[in-house]
Image (spheres, rainbow, N blue to C red):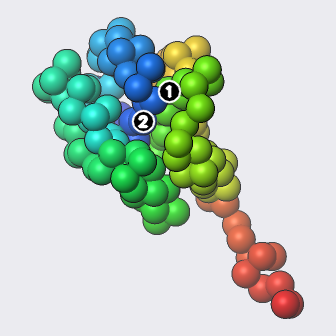
Amino acid sequence: MSSQQPRKRIALVAHDARKADLIAWIGANIEALDGHAFWATGTTGQKVRAAHPGLDITPLKSGPLGGDQQIGAMIAEGRIDLLVFFVDPMTAQPHDVDVKALTRLATLYNIPMACNEATADMIVSSAHFASGYAPRAASFTDYETRKV
């Protein structure tokens, strides 16, 4: 990361069958990712830290034990700039409602989200990733001022 590039706050999540893919993706993009701050759910964070000890990774709870919700809260509070969530589409997840809530919050708060390597590659290779780009903040005025 150049001294000109703003430090991004990146959340990392990967289902069990995709953890190795996430670690490999990080390795392939380590130059672009180095110097940014990361938060990762449970085992994902442990495995990423072991494979890439130079990254600044803050571990959270395991996804099914509340880690997905911790990241969701960080998104709602404006403390996450990017969600990289490598999803396993072939395996039912026992905490599927938490997964849906997390992806819903990333969508609602206009946070870039990559659910696979191709999208993650596009994001980190974008000129926006290396700049001070910030997505337009979501506005909830209509919702918050509605009559009920």
Image quarter where the C terminus lies is bottom right
**Which class describes the residues within 10 Å of circle 1: few (<14), some (14-19), or many (20+)?**
many
Depth check: 9 or 117 in front? 117
Amino acid at dot 1: Phe
Q: Secondary structure at mark 2?
A: strand
For the point 52% across and 16% down, the residue is 117
Q: Disc 1 versus disc 2: distance between alpha carbons?
A: 6 Å
Badge number at residue 13: 2
- Residue 141 at what x, y percent from top left? 74, 76
Depth check: 23 or 31 in front? 23
For the point 43% across and 30% down, the residue is 14
Relative to 121, say whether 4 is above or below: below
Badge number at residue 94: none
Relative to 114, say whether 32 is above or below: above
Q: Is residue 140 left or right of residue 91?
A: right
* Residue 41 can be seen, yes or no: yes
Could you tell which of marks 1 and 2 lies nearer the N-terminus?
Answer: 2
For the point 37% across and 53% down, the residue is 65
State yes or no: discs 1 and 2 in contact (Cβ < 8 Å): yes
Q: Is residue 51 left or right of residue 97?
A: left
Q: Is residue 71 left or right of residue 146?
A: left
**Which class describes the residues within 10 Å of circle 2: few (<14), some (14-19), or many (20+)?**
many
- Residue 116 at what x, y percent from top left? 56, 21
- Residue 75 at what x, y percent from top left? 49, 56
Q: Secondary structure at mark 1?
A: strand
Quadrant of the image occupied by residue 28: top left
Image quarter where the N terminus lies is top left
Q: Which residue is mark 1?
A: 86
Relative to 26, say whether 61 is above or below: below
Amino acid at dot 2: Val
